[in-house]
Amino acid sequence: MFKSKYAFIALAAALAGTTALAEGNPWQVRARVLGVYPDEGADLSVGGAALGGDVDIDAGYVPELDISYFFTDNISAELILGVTPHDVTATNVAAVGGADVDIGDVTLLPPTLTLQYHFPTGGKFIPYVGAGVNYTIFFDEDAGPVADDIDYDPSFGAALQAGFDVDFDGVPGGWMFNVDVKKIWINTDVTVDFTTALGATVDADVDINPWVIGVGAGYKF
């Protein structure tokens, strides 16, 4: 967690220290529709003892806004803004005979900052790659019909991306079509209070690690 936090600070400092600005207005905005597909897994325990089971987190489909700042014609920083709600199920739980347990839903706020390189193709098709960091906050936690309460810790993690813009109005600037794919590493410690149902509290080390696929339009000023 701390290593990722330092990486976030180092990336921000590197961006702040870049002085070679792109020609014209350096700002770009996009609006996309995202599919968020968790690649989830979990280790469950009670009082430090391993408890059989796993976790299933459903996919989410949400609108998203991102803002980019071009330091040069080919190097930019992108910040994505959006929230994603997900239903969560504990699966194959040993304490209840291997049954699945509905543990409600939760909403993620996962702002992600990446540093990107846009390949100088000289045409309307402009691919790019990026890498950066993510900080995820969990809110609107609903424990579901069985648990008494649930708590998710915030998460720091890495992010990788690849995508492309198709510039409708010429290079650079103007309206564009965009496709973007990100892999984001999100890990959270979850505490589920099952006092009423099981007389115990379950601790879960949960990897969410979603693939985030976006399609939308943007404008380069």
Image: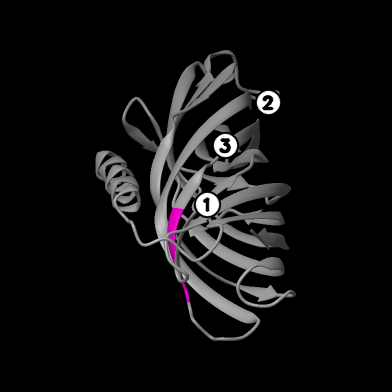
Q: Earlier in the sequence, mark 3 or mark 2?
A: 3
Mark 3 touches mark 2? (CB < 8 Å): no
Identify the residue shown where x is 45% and y is 50%: 113
Q: Which residues are magenta?
A: 114-118
- Label 2 crowd bin: few (<14), some (14–19), many (20+), radius 10 Å: some
| Residue 6 as seen in the image, left or right of residue 184 | left
User: Of helix, strand and loop, which mostly describes the magenta segment?
Assistant: strand
Q: Is residue 37 above or below residue 88?
A: below
What is the secondary structure assignment of the residue under circle 3? strand
Mark sitting earlier along the chain (3/1): 1
Residue 99 in percent (x, y) is at 63, 40
Residue sitting at the far top: 196
The amino acid on which the numbered mark 2 sits, given as a three-letter code, is Gly
Calculate the distance from the C-alpha at mark 1 to the C-alpha at mark 2.
19 Å
Q: Which residue is mark 3?
A: 109
Q: Is residue 8 magenta?
A: no
Q: Residue at x 33, y 47 (%)?
A: 16
Percent x, y of residue 189: 41, 33
Residue type beneath disc 1: Glu
Identify the image's colour scheme: rainbow, by chain, secondary structure or one colour: one colour
Q: Which residue is mark 2?
A: 144
Alpha carbons under labels 3 and 2: distance apart: 20 Å
Which residue is identified by label 1?
40
